[in-house]
Amino acid sequence: QSALTQPASVSGSPGQSITISCTGSISDIGAYNFVSWFQQHPGKAPKLLISDVRNRPSGVSNRFSGSKSGNTASLTISGLQSEDEADYYCCSYTSINALVFGGGTKLTVL
Amino acid sequence: EVQLVESGGGLVQPGGSLRLSCAASGFTFSSYVMTWVRQAPGKGLEWVSFISPDGDKRYHADSVKGRFTISRDNPKNTLYLEMNSLRGEDTAVYYCVRGKVQLDYWGQGALVTVSS
């Protein structure tokens, strides 16, 4: 199972919006609405931001939103803040009863 | 409050074995699929394994199949990962995670270092 494809890095200024893409295949993202997004700060465990493509768990800011089109999922962060600087990972359930993660995207807030 | 606490990590020689444990509290452990995810130093996240709530169904990544075994003891609220024939590329922080897709709660991680 190949990893999902994410850009290695993205950047934006405070207050701006950015979008991170996550491209898979018809066997994972394209087959199921089971896409999650995680935020990870250095030295910390990942934190769930989005589940089931677009659902935000309680306590997650509404500045984070998810979507999907075909084999590609996206995470949008609006109103960028300095504390958003972190690594972001997408994850999808797959047709072989497994999970696959993206390679991760490092977000820099300029 | 949901808590997941891993233990059992450490330094092991190539070809050796190690068992990780994850003590769960704050939720009905026996009702949830549980998952192990690992992260090599400076690298991304990698799914390792998950197990059904009753322990009847287990799935492992190809990279660990035949060497690692996930199990659980529901009366003890504990998840395990038995790791055999360890290789250098298994060096990573291993996270115990609640859920199968939502992965909503993560432990702090246990570091496993495979080196001679």
Image (cartoon, coloured by chain):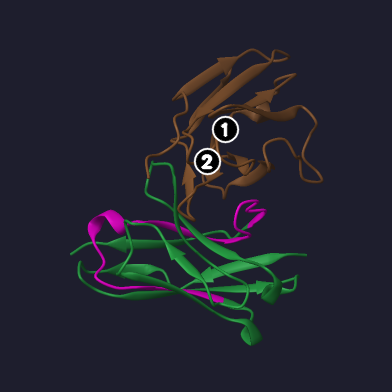
Which amino acid does the dot numbered 1 rest on? Ala
- Asked if labels 2 and 1 touch by Cβ distance under 8 angstroms, the answer is yes
In the image, A110 versus B91, the foreground residue is: B91
Q: Quadrant of residue A13?
A: top right
Chain at numbered mark 1: A
Q: Secondary structure at mark 2?
A: loop
Local crowd size for mark 1, using a 10 Å CA cut-off: few (<14), some (14–19), many (≥20): some
**Quadrant location of the N terminus of chain A?**
top left
* Residue A109 left/right relative to B63: right
Q: Is residue B101 magenta?
A: yes
Residue B116 x, y percent position in the rendering: 18, 64
Residue that appears at 69% across and 15% down: A17
Question: Which image quarter holds the C terminus of chain A?
Answer: top right
Residue B71 visible in image: yes
B107 lies above or below A93 = below
Query: In the image, B33: left or right of A7?
Result: right
Q: Which residue is mark 2?
A: A42
x, y percent for residue A48: 66, 45
**A2 drawn magenta:** no
Magenta stretch?
Answer: B79-105
Location of mark 1 (residue): A86
Question: What is the quadrant of residue B19 in the picture?
Answer: bottom left
Chain A, which colour? Answer: brown
Find chain B in the image and tell me its colour.
Answer: green
